Image (spheres, grey):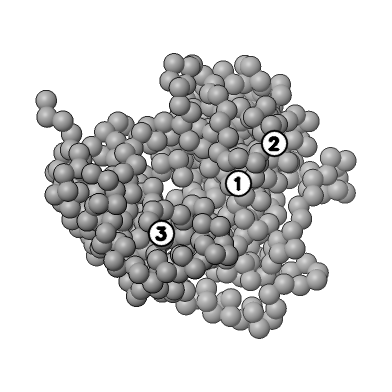
Amino acid sequence: MQIVDSAIFKTFVASNQRSKLHAERARQVIPTGMSRALLRHPPFPAYSASGAGVHTTDLDGNVRLDFHGNYAALIHGHAHPQISAAVTDQLSRGSAYSSPASQELRLAEHLCSRVKSVQRVLFNNSGTEAVLVALRAARALTGRSRIGKFEGGYHGFSDYVMVGGHATHGAEAMRGLLPIAADTHGLPPSVKTDAVLMRYNDIDSVRTAIERYGTEMAAIIVEPMLGSGGVIPAKAEFLTALREETFRAGIVLICDEVITLRQAYGGLQSSYALEPDLTTFAKIIGGGFPIGAVGGSASAMSVFDEQITDRHVANLGTFSANPVSAVAGITALELLDEAAIMRLARLGDRARQGLIDVVRRHSLRAQITGLGSMFQIHWTPDPVTDARAADSADPNLKLLTFLGLANRGIQTSMRGMCCLSTPMRESDVETLVAAFEDTVHELSHEGLDIRMSRP
């Protein structure tokens, strides 16, 4: 059966006619009809009109429970009243200034008190910028140029991390390092020569990389849980050994907490007792507004102070540390205390277990991964411990499950990633699980191969 012949596909098209027309009009002035590549999917997206609490409403009036959360950024849902009030008050005082905004200090102090490894922090406009600046700092600190990253890791869209975002095909027989594959066209050739690609949760791959390129590596950047790569938690022994190996080789260890800060009060690094040299932040620290940040030890962050170093690294940006993002961010983080995080983790456990029960009950060729307030549905029978396994998921089942859930009033990411927000209740999780099981029934009715083979 072709995807377009599926009843799920046809229902989505019929229920989103205004979005279809909007997409056709948008394509006349915006390539592909939207600016954000990660939101594109067949046949077209359901364009949002508004959001409130845990719900969004699209142009056709369809209301959906938002388990997408703008890729985990909206930890308090949409239009949270306290965040909205803080922003409204700030807007009356100005959205940006011609001298440093005083509002950034509270946010900086909060992050430094919250994350053990962070003694100094500075702000920019996105996770992409934060990573770009952190890599530049690592190069200044070490005088080296190579950057190590892990297959499936997503660290924004600056040139030197836009490699290895997906499994490298044909490399199954290789031990240790992986061949470099660009994630997009338009990158300079140097991104391939400067990148070192390793397997996630595989410390032998790290040791091979350091043995071969250690004296040339400025940094290794790692997510304590692969986010876009499949919502796959790191193994504790992997992160412990990674810290030991990078320290021994004089390589700057950068922990990307852009997604995972939501998982523990001190960031997911605190759950692993990991103390990186630098940490990158974004998403929830802006309370729904654009922001990024780089933090770290006083010595590592010294490269940003031209008064104490001759290896100064500039952090620029017209809207960096703007007061609107700062007041929204501090409000959001103060709301996200340990009790709120623990409640979300319990709700996440309930959601994962509910989805796992559906998988087992129907003997599905599927896996559920995740930790805390995040999880993902994978249409593969193989255990998902790295991006290679995540990339083996059936793409047709992935798309139809996404559309099937949308038809039932559930918004997830197209890849199957889900996250929770603080306004959510147990009933919302139960709605998600029921919608997934109902979608499974429809997939089965359409004759799709969704179950494990009988022995």
**Circle 1: element type:** loop
Q: Are marks 1 and 3 in contact (CB under 8 Å)?
A: no
The residue tagged 1 is 157
Residue at 73%, 41% in the rendered image: 136
Residue 404 is situated, as x and y percent measured from the top left of the image, at 27, 56
Q: Nearer the viewer, residue 181 or 81?
A: 181
Is 66 or 206 nearer to us in this picture?
66
The amino acid type of the residue labelled 3 equals Phe
**Residue neighbourhood size for the residue with mark 3, other residues' Cα within 10 Å, grouped as few (<14), some (14–19), many (≥20):** some
Mark 2 Cα within 10 Å, few/some/many (few <14, many 20+)? few
Q: Is residue 423 shown left or right of residue 308? A: left
The amino acid type found where label 1 is placed reads Phe
Q: Residue furthest bottom?
A: 92
Residue designated by label 2 = 188
Q: CA distance from mark 3 to mark 2?
A: 31 Å
Task: Name the one closer to the observer, 25 or 401.
Answer: 25
Q: Which residue is mark 3?
A: 44
CB under 8 Å between callouts 2 and 1?
Answer: no
Instruction: Kindly report which numbered mark, 3 or 2, lies closer to the viewer in this rendering.
Output: 3
- The quadrant in which residue 455 appears is top left
The numbered mark, 2 or 1, whose residue comes first in the sequence reads: 1
Above or below, comparing residue 20 to residue 9 in the picture: below
Q: Is residue 77 left or right of residue 135?
A: left
Q: Secondary structure at mark 2?
A: loop
Query: Circle 3 — which element?
Result: loop
Q: Residue 113's spot in the image, x, y percent?
A: 60, 55
Q: Residue at x 59, y 21 (%)?
A: 209
